[in-house]
Image (spheres, rainbow, N blue to C red):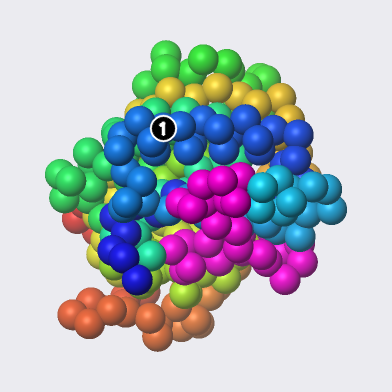
Amino acid sequence: MKDITYSIVIPAYNEGTRLGATLEKVLGYVRAQGWNAEVEVIVVNDGSRDNTAELVRGFAARDPVLRLVENPGNRGKGYAVRNGMLNARGEIVVFSDADLSSPIEEMPKLLAALAAGADIAIGSRWLRAELQTQRQSALRQLAGRIFNALNRIILGLRFKDTQCGFKAFTRRAAQTILPLQRIERWGFDPEILFLARKFGFRVEEVAVLWGHSGDTRIHPLLDGVRMFQEMLRIRWYDLTGKYDGGAAPGEQAVKTLPGGPRPGI
């Protein structure tokens, strides 16, 4: 099998109405970079009930860099991202939301952070708020600030934005963290960042262009409560040793407490 440098993972659930435009942009960007021989684009179908899978197969028939991964039914975005990333063959694995709220053209910013020594680069909507092309509603912004504060208090994650759906991992970081991920729905982002901190990976937060999609499926209150519950689950999993079996050679898992992050986190 040929060597792959970049894997781009796109989780998709009932995305038939907008996924075509997304794939046109992503595949066009890949061609413009001349990456055809060293890139793969993976769409993970999370049990869609529309034409998402058929749409991807149609694109894949015309462009061999694209392939479809099927989840066993609708399992959630966290499961889809994990399934796609663990099926990826690239030395660098990027996942992007299907709506491209952060344009794929922002990918070089994440790659530059990895090239500078980071193990994980996370896109951020709030590191430079002026880069937002379309703001969320006031209610969503308030819910996001509360969620971010709870992340700091409960999990010790000192990032301005954990939830932006645009992140890049070295293969080593992805293969260490993703097998331990247990949260399958919206609260998976804090979990993978918590695990990155636990295993001493360097995470760099990167300001990216971002525009709110009006078709988002997250309810700021109901899903916010669920994600709070998932934060508590993450803390419980850590305290009860559920994450302790996955350290890569030369790494040591530690119980992580809210407070000062490990170097580089």
In this view of the protein, which residue sits in the foreground, 176 or 36? Answer: 36
- Residue extending furthest toward the right: 49
Residue 199 at x, y = what percent? 30, 69
Residue pictured at 35% horizontal, 30% vertical: 32
The residues colored magenta run: 59-88
In this view of the protein, which residue sits in the foreground, 196 or 239? Answer: 196
On screen, 83 above or below 189? below
Residue pictured at 58% horizontal, 51% vertical: 60
Residue 264 visible? The answer is: yes
Amino acid marked by disc 1:
Tyr
Residue 261 at x, y = what percent? 29, 55
The local secondary structure at tag 1 comes to helix
Residue pictured at 66% horizontal, 20% vertical: 138
Total residue callouts: 1
Q: Does the magenta stretch include residue 33?
A: no
Residue 225 visible? The answer is: no
Residue that numbered label 1 is attached to = 29
